[in-house]
Image: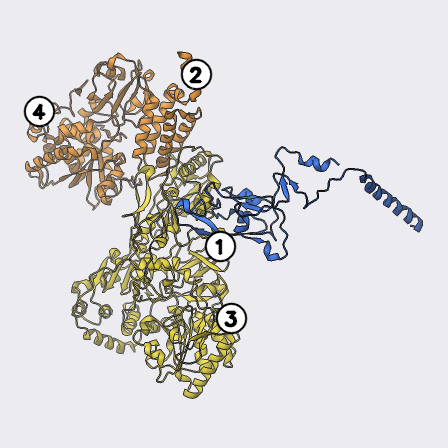
Chain colours: A blue, B yellow, C orange
Amino acid sequence: MSIISDIVESTKSIIKGMSVTFSYIPKAKWTVQYPEEPVTLQPRYRGQHLLHVDELGREKCVACYLCAAACPSDCIYIVAADDPRAPEERTGVDERYAEVYNIDYGRCIFCGYCVEACPKDAITHGYNFELSVYNRADLLKTKDDLLITKQKQSPNYRVAFSDEDVDSEYKEV
Amino acid sequence: MTTAESVKVTINGQEFQVQKGAPLIDVCRENGFAIPSFCYYADLALQASCRMCLVRIEKMPKLQTSCTITCTDGMIVTTQSEEIEKAQRGMVEFLLANHPLDCPVCDRGGECELQEMVFDWGGLEERFTERKNYYPEKFLSPIVANDPQRCILCKRCTRVCDEWMGEDAIEAGGRGANTVIGTFGGWLNCSQCGNCIEVCPTGTLLDATYRHQTRPWELERTVSTCTFCSDGCQMSLGSRAGELMRVVARDRYVDGINGEFLCIKGRFAHPFVNHEERLRTPLIRYRKGGKLIPATWDEAIRFTAAKLQEIKDAHGANSIGVVGSPRLTNEANYVLLKFAREVIGTEHYTASEAFSLAPFFKHMTAPLATHKDIRHAKTIVLIGGEPEELQPLTAKQVRQAVRNGGAKLVIINSVPVRLKQQATQFLHVRPGTEDALVLALAGQTDDAMAARKMGVEVGEIEPLRRMIDETQGNVVLMFGGELSTEAQTILAQLPGSIGDEENRRFLFHPLPLFNNSFGVHDVGLMDGKLNATGLLDAAGDTVRALYVAGGLLPAHLQGREQALQNLDFLVVQELFATDTTAHADVVFPAASFAEIDGTYTNNDGLVQRVRQSIPPVHQAKPDWVITSLLADALGIDFNYQMSASAVFREIGEHVPAYQGLRYPLLKDESKPVQAKYQLAGQRAEVADVLAELRQRVERMTGAGDKIMETPEVGHELFKIGTLTGKVPQFHLLAAGNPEPPDVLVSPLYQITIDSGLRRDTAIAGD
Amino acid sequence: MFIGAIGCEPLQLKRVGLENSRTLDVYRQHGGYEALKKVLDGMSPEDVIGEVKKSALRGRGGAGFPTGMKWSFVPKDSPKPKYVVCNADESEPGTFKDRFLMERDPHMLIEGMLIAAYALGSRTTYIYTRGEYRYLINILDAAIQEAREAGLVGDRIMGTEFSCEVFTHTGAGAYICGEETALLNSLEGLRGHPRMKPPFPAIAGLYGCPTVVNNVETLTAVPDIIKMGGEAYQKLGTQKSGGTKVWSVSGHVNRPGVYELPMGYEDMEKFIMEDCGGMLGGKQLKAVIPGGSSVYIMPATDIVGKKVKMDYEGLVVAGSMVGSGGFIVMDETVDVFESTKNLTEFYKHESCGWCTPCREGTDWLVKVFKRIAKGEGRPEDAQLLLDLCDNIEGKSFCPLGDAAAWPIQSAIKKFPEDFRRHLMPMATRTAEAVAAD
C-alpha cells in the first residue's frame, strides 16, 4: 500500500469522525451542572444502602445473614447479638439484632441481591452515590453510616417521580 | 444378631438380599431410596409419629410407616408413587400449618431438617390461612432455649433424654395440637448435656449459649476431639473470624464414635478458648517476689534457657523436673519427654495425672473395649468410678447396652451412683474397699472375708462371678481410680486366669479422667522416677527447678503450695493465670486444643486427631513448639520444622503402641485407629503383688459408714474449674441452677452469681 | 326414655329394669353366676373359647372383631401373667349403653370378666372406665366387694382352684384412652398414647404381658353365651354376627333410650318410625349417624324404603357402620354443617397429639370450620376440607384420625347443600336474603 492511499484513507476517516463531532455543535446541550445542580435519579437507582427502622424507631434488621449469604462480592459483615430487653426498648424489632453491620463499598457491586434476599425489608438501596473517599479504609461503612435515621443524604440529587419520564430528558437532544 | 438370615425384598421393582428383621427404612436408604423421616432415629425406641416415611407394601392395607416394618421374605415395597408423594406432601403441609415463619431469626435456619424437607416435599403455596397457635419463646435452663411453636413433636429429645441420659428431664405436656415439649416444674434440672438440642430437627430446642450469635453457613467447621474427658468424643468446632463460636456433634458434620452425643462440657464449655483472660504474651518474673512482666518470646526463651542451664550446671541434670499433662496432645507430651531426656538429661519427668494406669498397661491380658464394644457387650462390670459424671459417653453406652441391648450390668461402688438404676446387681461397698472385690474375683480369698471388709452380704459375690462365667458375648471390665496399683495389676491379669471361652471374650475399659490419660502412658512420660506429688515434695531439696506444661492438678497442689515457693526456678506453660502460674518465674502462653494440630488417645486406645480450628489467640504457641524453641535455645534442634505431623511421625517410629501411625491414617474420624497395645501373658511375678493386695485387704478395718446418698446430677460436671469457670452459665449451674423470675429472658441477664460461691475442686479439675 | 328389647327376648337388658338390679341377690335370683358355675364345674378354657367362637360374638366396642378369635390369639404357653381388661371408656359421642349396663347390672360384667379370665388363664382383671364415669366406680367396687364376700371374686372362686381378682381403674377423661393400647398405657400410669401395633395386646399388652381388651357389652354377653350355648346365641342374630346388640338411641325421636335388638334387625326405617316412636314433633327425618360419631353419616334417602339391615354387614352395605351402636337421629332442622363442626371440634379436643396428621389435621379442620361459621367461607373450602380429610385418613397412627375424617367426608358428600350455603361469600348471601324478602 502506497503512502498516497494511506493519506487518502486517513483523511477520509478524520472527515467521517469529525462530521459526527461537528453535527453535535448546533444541537442543544444536556450536560448536568453537577454539583451546582442536583442530578435526577431513577426511582429504582441503586445507591448506597439504607437500613430501615420501624415506626417505633427500632431497626428492622434481625441479623439473619441472608444478605451476606446472597452477596456475590462478599462485602457484608454482620455480628448478630441478643437483646434481652422488653420489646419496646429493644434496638431492633426482634430479640435478635445486628450488633455490627458493615458494608465494604470497596467491594460492593450494587447488584441488589442483598435487597432481594432480605426477608424483613430491612435493607434497600438508597440514592446516595457520592462514595469517594481519600482513604480506602473509609469505604467500609458501619451501621451508623447505613441506618436511615443516621445516613446523611447528599443535597446533590433529586429522585424522579415514578411517572416522570426521565429518559427523554437525556434522549431529547 | 446371631441369626443373620438373608431374605429377599423387592423395592421399587429391584430385588435385594437383606438381613431378616432389618428395619425397612434403613434397608431402603442403604440401597439409595431416599425416605424422608423426622421421628426415626437409629438406636432409639420407635415412634412412628411423623408419618413421613410412608411406603406401600403389597398385601398390606393402607400405607405403612417404613420405620416400624421389619423386612420379611418376599416383601414387595414401593417407596415412590403418586399416592405416597401426596401423603408425604400432606404431612409436610400439616407440619408447617402451625410452624412459624421465623427462619430468619431461628438459630437452626440453614441446618434445619424441616427446611430441607420443605425443599423436597413442601407445597408451592400455603393453604393454611388461619391463625397459628402461639407460644412464646422461653428458656428451660441457662443452656437450653425452647420455642414450642417450632416443635414438630418428633420426640427425639424426650427419647434421647430417657434412653441416652437416663434422666427423663423433658417430656411432652398437653394434648393434641396443644402438645408442647416441657419440663417437670417448668425448669430443667438435669445434667444439661444438650443432646436434646443436638437431635432436634427444628429450632425448638436451641443452644442458649450460642443463641443469636451467627448462622451455620457462616461457620468454618473443623473436626476435632473433645478435650474434657477420656472418652474422646468427636466434635465439630464452628469458628468464625478467629473465634470459636460453638461445638456440635451433628452427624452431618462429624461422624465419630459418639454419634451426636456430647456432654455439657464438650458442648458448652468451649468459651474459654477466646476468653479475654487468656494469657497474651510470655511473662517473666525477673526477681523472686516481683511481678510477672510481659516479655517478647525471644526474651522469655533466652531467659528460661539461661536459667535452666545455670541450674543444671550448678545442681546437675536431675535437679530439674519436667511435668507434662494428660490434657496435652501426644505431640506435646512426647516433645516434653524428649526435652527432659535429651536436652536436660533428667530422670525426673512425669505428668500431673490423677492416677497412674502404668500397672494396668504392663499387665493387661485382654484388649481394650471400644465404645462400640460396650454398646454391644453382654456383661459389664463397673468397679468404682462414676462415668455419668466423669466419662458421660461411656455411661451412655452402658445405659444403652442395658436398655436396648439387654446387657447385664454389675456395679461395685462405695457411692450409690445414678447408673445403678440400670444395674442388674449393685454391690454397695464401704469407701475404699473396692480392692477386696478384685481379690475375691481373682479367687484369692474366701468370699466371707471380702464381703465383711466391703460390708456386703456374702451371697452377693457369687452371683457376680456366675454372671461373668455364664456370659455369651463380651464381658467388659471397667474400673476407676479407686483401685490400688496392686488391685489394678491383679484385675489386669484376671482375664488370663479365668480364660476365654468360645463365646465369651474379656475386654478392658479403664476410666481415667483426662482426654489424653492414655497418651501420657503411651509416650512414656509416666515412666519417670517420681510422680507429680513426689516432685513437689522434693521441691527445694533435690529438685531445684520445674518445667510444668499444662498446670498442676489442684489435688496435687493442695497442701503443697509452699513447694513451688521453694523452687529456684519454675517455668509454666498455661492458658490462664492459675495457682501454678502464681509462683512461676516464666509463664508461656500456650495454645488451646482449638488452636493446634495433634492427637489424643482416648480410653478406647483410639488415637484421634485434634485439628486447628482458629489461629492461636494473641501470642500463644502450641506446647510442643514452646518446648522445641527451648530445646533450640539450649543447643539441640529437634528439627520439626514447625510441623505437628513431623512430631507424630517420630512418635510413630519410637512409641511401640503407635508403630506406623501417621496423620493421614487418622484422617477419617468414622474409622478410628486403635493403638496396638502389647498384651501380657500370665506372669509369675504377680504373686508378690497378690500377696501385697491380700495384706492390703486384710488391713482394711471392715467397719465404717457407707455413703448412702446418691450424688446430685452434675455434682462433678458443673464444678467451676479453670476452664469451665470461664463460662458464665456454669456459674449458674454450680450455684444450683436457680430458676429466674422470668423464663422468657435469658437467666444470664437476670441472675448475678457470685463466682466464689462454690469453688470445690472437681476431681477432673477442669 | 325406653329401655328394653325389640324383636327378641332381652338378654343384656334382662335385669336393668328391676328394683335393686345392681345387687347380688337380685342378680342371682335371675340366673346370675350360673354361667360361671357351669364353666367352673366342668368346662375347660378351650371349651369356653370354643363356645364364644361358635356364638359369632363380635366386639361391641366399634371395630367388630370376632371375640372368640381374639381370645384364641393369647399364647397358652406364655410364662408371663395374662390380663383381661374391660374397656369401659365409653367416650364415643352418642353412645351410653355401657353406662347403663354397669350402672344397673354390674354383676353381669363381673361374671363375664371372670369367665373370660378363666378362659384365658388370667388371675388379674381390670375394669377401666372413663374419667367422667367416676361415680360408677363406687357401684362397681360395691358389686365386686359383694361378690368377693360371696366367694365369687378373689381366691378359690366357688371353692375351685380358679382364683381371680377384679380391679377398677378410672381414666382422666380422654377419648383416646378408649383405644385399647392407649387404654393400656393409661392403665400403666403412662400418657394416654396409643402404642405401636404389632405387637398386638394379645401378645404384649399390659406390662408387656398377653392381654385381652374387651368392651363392656362384649363381656356381658359372655354369661348368656355360656348359659344358652354358642350356637343358640348365634341363631339370635345372623351367620356372621351373632346374638343381640344394644343400641343407644338419641336425637329427634319420640322415644330415645337403650334398645336391645337382634343382630340383623330387618329395617332401620321401621326401627325409627315405629319402635322409637317416630320423629319428634312429626318432622322429617334428615340424617342418621348409626354407630356413634365416628362413622359415616346416612342421609334419609339411604334409609327410607331401603330396608337397611341393622348388623355389621347390613350397615356397611348401606354405607355406614355399626360402630359402638350410638344411634343419633337428626330431623330436618339440623344443619349438618354445624353438627359436623361440632364433631370435628370434639376430635380436635380429643386428639392425643402423637402423630402429625391427626394432631395438625384436626386443628386445621376446626380452624377452617370456625372460619366458615364466622361467615368467611370460600367456595374452595369444601375441596380443602375433603383434601385434608384425605391426608388424615389412613395415615394416622391410630384410628382416631380416620374417625375424625369420615364424618366430614360423608357429610360433604351426602349433604352438599348444607355446606354450599355456608361457603357462599357473605355478599351473595345477603343479596339472596334481600331478594327473598
For label 4, the residue is: C19
In this view, A34 is above or below B598: above
Dot 3 alpha-carbon crowd within 10 angstroms: few under 14, some 14 to 19, many 20 or more:
some
SS under mark 2: helix
Q: CA distance from mark 1 to mark 2?
A: 61 Å
B387 or C40, which lies in front? Answer: B387
| Residue that mark 1 sits on | B219
Residue that lies at the very extreme toward the front in this rendered image:
A36
- Res. B653 in view: no
Closer to the observer: label 1 or label 3? 1
Amino acid bearing label 3: Ala
Residue wearing tag 2:
C431
In this rendered view, identify the residue nearer to me: B88 or B355.
Answer: B355
- Residue C51 place in picture, x, y as percent: 18, 30
Q: Are marks 4 and 1 on the same chain?
A: no
Side of B413 where A113 appears, left or right: right
> Given the image, what chain letter belongs to the residue carrying mark 2?
C
Under tag 4, what secondary structure? loop
- Left or right: C145 as drawn, with respect to B368: left
Q: Nearer the viewer, residue B736 or B616?
A: B736
**In the structure shown, which secondary structural element does the residue marked by tag 1 occupy?**
loop
Q: Amino acid at mark 4?
A: Glu
Question: Distance from label 1 to label 3 (Cα)?
Answer: 29 Å
Q: Position of residue C298 (x, y in %)?
A: 32, 20
